[in-house]
């Protein structure tokens, strides 16, 4: 090839080198005009159906350069020959250096019928639908509406000049025409090979193709030099081989349906018409060379996967990588189907399912006009904001950290009454004839002796005897229990229970109600007075639970305490949460009721020495290390983790979670705990709080040495090991 005389319209930059382009050139044509290839060889179709022109354009990788108009200043970086495009080097210490992309607009519309493709079959479909009085939307890439995916609904996502277009249609007609079959033979990965349609486009653009050879189904192989084709070898009817020198090889091997979009959905309402739906003759089965130019899959790769038993097309695709590239089989699928048919001596398999997107789009385009908060919100989120809460993220949820004065919230719990949002707790209902047996095997405490209407605190252990989670076991009936878990551990706990129940083959049903039930914790010395005003005259005693209506909202009322004061958790349907919250706040106004956030709650629980799994615990935390042997009943013959606990009970353990106290302000959580003798780090603080009641700094943390020290250094000050609970060690107030 040589440069053709053409009027220069501008220059683009390819691999750091400026090249000229003519008016109307695509990026791919501009590169071919210089005698090079836009990718790393392989047949060019210049119609967007293959992956042989992919490159990084203006910082976006996997762009089909034949579909991008050359404009002055366009920067093109061809993908590496043997790997993926390089990620940009970003200095994460200065994120202000990162470019900010423009906002991508999303336009949404509906239609009775959406027709994809404006060719003759597409126009016929449009006319037929309009004649039937239906509203029709035509999407044609030549007009700038490039469909990238068909989704259930059915719906369409397209890229158009204004941004992204989302279409909801009753019927989708795919009229995308056909594609030219590409060669799959030795040498087909060389540069300088083009389809007949690509040759026409290049000639129309004034590109000199040099010495050209046209070849059809008699093609045997290509020969080349320095990565470019130099000759075509064909075979005649008498099996005679002929070698023809050339600079450009134009192949005309027939056509196949352009059906990538049609293969995305086989649901009712999506159909293909015209050449996109026609069953075209397949090419001869490939015998050697590259079959899938996108992934570099060869005939040898197909044979290796086949010999391992991957004989179904969907499995062969995954095992050999054929069809997994950007064109999703647009170039290789006819050859793979033909190859399978030859191996089985049967009909070719149906084409495999394609996945959106059919065209490369950026993450910004995919996520345009979509905002997902990875942290969930309770039904009381807006109530917290109205009350001036400072929200923070904890355990996968947005939760109030405080409402402006954490100390005042603390005193409301200790001396009056307070409400807190605990909707985030995990809530499972388990039932069935084998439910007691299942829970006895899962939990380290006894379950069978829990009476209906009563509850028990329990740890959840793994096979190594390490603490995974904790919560309550509440017995509703003989074969029905409610289980609660921590906010951050709920999903894992559900998975854990379901997996073991299925493994054991027990007849137990598990229903996750975490997202369908809200919960409000009402706590403080005046809590019974407040709840009596709203209908709860006969409150359950400590660790009891009942069903009752409070302020007209049906509630599962649970008597327990994480704060150290009398407390009730009111579990209720989501749609009653706001009304219940407001009723509690209104009825307790003269009692000084106020909401409390996590900051006060963490201080309250610390004074009681209660553990927070995931914050206080580590991956290898055992009940013994927490000082919670009382929660494990080793007399039980079997439960998850029992064998490990029995084995490790005989070993020395140099790790303990204990309480500390000292004068002054509390240190930062996570602070190192040092030996007063030599300054060696022997642990860390997991929770700290300056107690307004006890007027000293209280801490919970780990000691990792023996013998355990009675005095340590934290934050440059001396602290003493102090028994927990720090507050009301007999638990009278929680049981009041």
Image: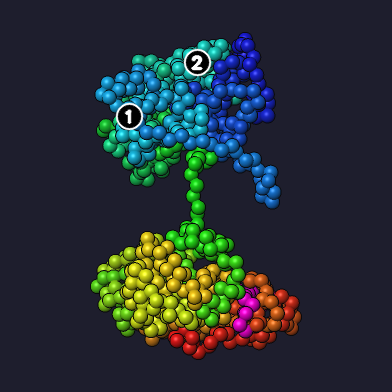
Prevailing SS of the magenta stretch: strand
Quarter-wise, where is residue 120 in the image?
Answer: top left
**Residue 51 image point, x, y percent:** 49, 30
**Residue 513 image point, x, y percent:** 36, 64
Residue 346, can we see it?
yes
Left or right position of 101 against 267: right
What range is drawn magenta here?
Answer: 681-694
Task: Name the image quarter holding the C terminus.
Answer: bottom left
Residue found at x 35% / y 29%: 114
**Residue 519 image point, x, y percent:** 42, 68
Which colour scheme appears in the figure? rainbow
Residue 113 — which label?
1
Residue found at x 26% / y 33%: 346
Q: Does 660 sit above or below residue 668? A: below
- The residue under label 2 is 201
The reply to whether dot 2 and dot 1 touch (C-beta < 8 Å) is no
Residue found at x 51% / y 79%: 416
SS type, badge 1 = strand
């Amino acid at each position: 090839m040589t440069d053709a005389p053409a009027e220069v319209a501008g220059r683009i930059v390819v691999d750091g080198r400026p090249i000229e382009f003519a008016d109307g050139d695509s990026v791919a044509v501009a590169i071919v005009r210089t005698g090079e290839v836009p990718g790393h060889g392989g047949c060019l179709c210049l119609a967007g159906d293959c992956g042989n022109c992919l490159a990084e354009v203006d910082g976006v990788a996997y762009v089909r350069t034949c579909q991008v108009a050359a404009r002055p200043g366009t920067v093109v970086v061809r993908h590496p020959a043997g790997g993926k495009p390089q990620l940009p080097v970003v200095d994460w210490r200065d994120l202000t250096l990162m470019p900010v992309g423009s906002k991508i607009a999303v336009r949404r519309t509906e239609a009775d019928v959406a027709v994809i493709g404006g060719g003759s079959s597409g126009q016929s479909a449009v006319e037929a639908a309009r004649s039937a009085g239906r509203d029709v939307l035509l999407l044609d890439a030549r007009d700038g509406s490039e469909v990238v995916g068909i989704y259930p609904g059915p719906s369409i996502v397209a890229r158009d000049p204004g941004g992204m277009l989302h279409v909801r249609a009753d019927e989708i007609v795919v009229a995308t025409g056909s594609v030219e079959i590409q060669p799959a033979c030795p040498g087909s990965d060389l540069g300088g090979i083009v389809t007949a349609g690509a040759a026409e486009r290049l000639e129309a653009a004034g590109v000199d193709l040099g010495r050209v050879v046209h070849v059809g189904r008699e093609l045997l192989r290509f020969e080349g030099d320095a990565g470019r084709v130099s000759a075509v070898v064909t075979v005649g009817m008498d099996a005679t081989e002929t070698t023809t020198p050339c600079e450009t090889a134009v192949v005309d091997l027939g056509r196949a349906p352009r059906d990538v979009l049609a293969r995305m959905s086989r649901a009712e309402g999506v159909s293909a018409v015209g050449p996109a739906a026609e069953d075209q003759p397949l090419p001869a089965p490939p015998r050697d060379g590259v079959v899938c130019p996108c992934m570099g899959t060869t005939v040898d790769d197909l044979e290796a996967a086949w010999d391992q038993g991957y004989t179904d097309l969907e499995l062969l695709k995954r095992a050999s990588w054929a069809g997994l590239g950007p064109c999703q089989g647009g170039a290789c699928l006819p050859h793979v189907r033909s190859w399978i048919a030859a191996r089985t001596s049967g009909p070719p398999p149906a084409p495999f399912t394609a996945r959106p997107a059919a065209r490369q789009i950026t993450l910004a385009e995919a996520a345009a006009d979509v905002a997902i908060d990875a942290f969930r919100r309770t039904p009381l989120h807006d109530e917290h904001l109205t009350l001036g809460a400072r929200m923070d993220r904890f355990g996968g949820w947005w939760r109030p950290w405080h409402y402006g004065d954490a100390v005042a919230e603390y005193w409301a719990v200790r001396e009056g009454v307070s409400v807190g949002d605990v909707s985030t707790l995990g809530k499972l209902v388990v039932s069935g004839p084998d439910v007691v047996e299942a829970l006895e095997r899962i939990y380290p405490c006894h379950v069978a002796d829990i009476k209906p209407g009563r509850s028990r605190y329990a740890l959840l252990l793994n096979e190594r005897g390490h603490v995974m989670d904790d919560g309550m076991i509440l017995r509703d009936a003989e074969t029905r229990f409610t289980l609660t878990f921590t906010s951050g551990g709920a999903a894992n706990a559900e998975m854990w229970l379901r997996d073991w129940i299925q493994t054991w083959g027990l007849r137990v049903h598990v229903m996750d109600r975490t997202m369908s039930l809200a919960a409000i914790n009402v706590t403080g010395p005046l809590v019974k007075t407040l709840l009596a005003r709203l209908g709860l005259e006969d409150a359950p005693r400590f660790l009891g639970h009942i069903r009752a209506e409070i302020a007209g909202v049906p509630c599962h009322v649970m008597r327990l305490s994480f704060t150290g004061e009398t407390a009730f958790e009111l579990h209720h349907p989501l749609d009653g949460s706001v009304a219940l919250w407001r009723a509690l706040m209104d009825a307790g106004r003269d009692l000084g009721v106020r909401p409390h956030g996590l900051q006060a709650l963490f201080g309250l629980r610390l004074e009681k020495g209660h553990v927070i799994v995931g914050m206080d615990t580590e991956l290898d935390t055992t009940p013994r290390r927490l000082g919670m042997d009382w929660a494990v009943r080793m007399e039980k013959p079997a439960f998850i983790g029992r064998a490990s606990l029995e084995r490790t009970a005989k070993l020395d353990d140099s790790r303990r979670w204990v309480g500390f106290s000292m004068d002054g302000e509390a240190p930062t959580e996570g602070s190192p705990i040092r030996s007063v003798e030599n300054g060696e780090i022997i642990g860390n603080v997991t929770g700290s709080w300056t107690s307004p009641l006890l007027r000293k700094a209280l801490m919970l943390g780990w000691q990792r040495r023996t013998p355990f020290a009675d005095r340590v250094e934290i934050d440059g000050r001396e602290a003493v090991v102090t028994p927990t609970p720090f507050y009301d060690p007999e638990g009278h107030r929680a049981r009041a």
